[in-house]
Image: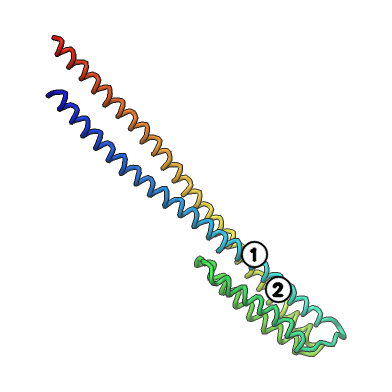
Amino acid sequence: MMKFAFSLKNKLKIAFLLFCIMCCTLLIRFLEDKSVKKINESFISMYNDRLVPATDLYFIGENLYHKNTILQEALLPDNPVDPSAGKAKIDKHNRKIDSVINKYEQTLLVKQEQSFLNELKKALLIQQDIELKVLNADATQRRMIYESIGRGAADQTLNKLSALIKIQSKVGDELIKGSKIFVSGTKVYSTLQMILAIVIGIMIVSIISASNAVKIQHDKFNLN
């Protein structure tokens, strides 16, 4: 009877232990899956919302350079400039820039990033207006308009673009830091699983040892 009672007690302990193991394993598995999902989302965001847009922003700079080249050609002395032809060339680059900005606006933007983008859009509109004034002016006024307001507007646009590119790098660093935190979390969960396995092993060995001890005592009692 004593042996049966001890056996039943051990079975209940083992059943409860297995239940706890199952709960802990499921919880750790859930946390691990959540961390892996967050890491995956961070890398996807890094590519779609940071790497690709940063490349597109440099493409804007390239088009700004080409527009400035067109204006510089218009400033050459005794250079017969057809305003409609020059405007057509600049409009072509403006459409490319607008296309990139529209694409960029579809990505995930932080508050500061949205603010810098709005400032860039305003600077681009100002620059476009001045470009038209330069192209529509006569040869003597073109240089004056460009030197008085045109050069400053172009520099201002480049400054706004540079600020937007820098914030891309800053947000990218924050995403990397976030990924490192999730990676550290997965390491912690792996360590917990190892500790849990060791504790389980110790408890099982203890139960078996205790069972053997009772069995020996019971056998001695029967011999007596």
Q: Residues within 10 Å of mark 1 (few under 14, many from 20)?
A: few
Q: Residues within 10 Å of mark 2 (few under 14, many from 20)?
A: some
Identity of the residue furthest to the left in this view? 1
Front residue of this view, candidates 145 and 202: 202
Residue type at numbered disc 1: Thr
Residue type at numbered disc 2: Asn
Colour scheme used in the picture?
rainbow
Residue at the image point whose x is 13% and y is 23% from the top:
2
Q: Quadrant of residue 153?
A: bottom right
Residue 111 appears anywhere in the view: yes
Residue at the image point whose x is 50% and y is 65% from the top:
110
Q: Position of residue 167 (x, y in %)?
A: 58, 63
Q: Position of residue 51 (x, y in %)?
A: 60, 61
* Left or right: 146 as drawn, with respect to 54: right
Q: Position of residue 163 (x, y in %)?
A: 61, 66
Front residue of this view, candidates 196 and 165: 196
Determine which residue is flagged by label 2. Answer: 63
Identity of the residue furthest to the top in this view? 224
Q: Position of residue 217 (x, y in %)?
A: 19, 15
Q: Quadrant of the C terminus?
A: top left
Determine which residue is flagged by label 1. Answer: 55
